[in-house]
Image (spheres, rainbow, N blue to C red):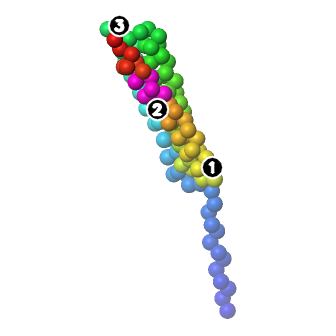
Amino acid sequence: MSEAPPPIPVKEGVSTVWVVLGILFIILWIIGHILWAGVSFIADVMANDSGRAPEGVHETLIFGMMGGQLLCGAAGVPAGLAFFWRRKRKLLLWLSALLFLPGALIQGGVLYSFFSSMR
């Protein structure tokens, strides 16, 4: 009689496609946030050309927006790693959210503070 064929080995590990997609996501996320931070910085510096907002509030706008942008930009790294790091995916997505949400709230808060302080 013939013997049963050997079992097909199960491929364990991560697909190269997911690794490439994750790294590409990280790179594009960081490039996008660098561009956004550059445009945002220019807009923040020029925001008080009329002099209607107090100087301290204007400085808070500049530094708050840049700090928030730094947090939002850093959120892309764990999100990109979550593409292919299956065992840590839930933790990485939570970490990404915990970086992104405060960064976005800081930016929104300093914008609100700036515009509400205009005379």
Task: Give the quadrant of residue 35.
Answer: top left
- The residue depicted at 63 percent of the width and 56 percent of the height is 13
Residue 79 is situated, as x and y percent measured from the top left of the image, at 53, 43
Q: Residues within 10 Å of mark 1 (few under 14, many from 20)?
A: few
Q: How far apart, in angstroms, are the residues tagged by discs 2 and 3? A: 26 Å
* Magenta region includes residue 108: yes
Residue 52 is situated, as x and y percent measured from the top left of the image, at 34, 9
Say which label, 2 or 3, has the lower sequence index.
3
* Magenta region includes residue 32: no
Judging by the rendered image, the residue that carries numbered circle 2 is 104
**Amino acid under disc 3:** Gly
Total of numbered circles in the picture? 3
Is residue 35 visible from the viewing direction of this image? no
Quadrant containing the N terminus in the rendered view: bottom right
For the residues carrying marks 1 and 2, which lies nearer the camera in this image?
2
- The residue depicted at 34 percent of the width and 11 percent of the height is 119
Judging by the rendered image, the residue that carries numbered circle 1 is 88
Q: Secondary structure at mark 1?
A: helix
Residue 71 is situated, as x and y percent measured from the top left of the image, at 53, 30
Q: Residue furthest left?
A: 50
| Nearer-the-camera pick, 53 or 35 | 53
Judging by the rendered image, the residue that carries numbered circle 3 is 51
Say which label, 1 or 3, has the lower sequence index.
3
**Amino acid under disc 1:** Lys
Q: Which residues are magenta?
A: 106-112
- The residue depicted at 49 percent of the width and 46 percent of the height is 21
Residue 110 is situated, as x and y percent measured from the top left of the image, at 44, 23
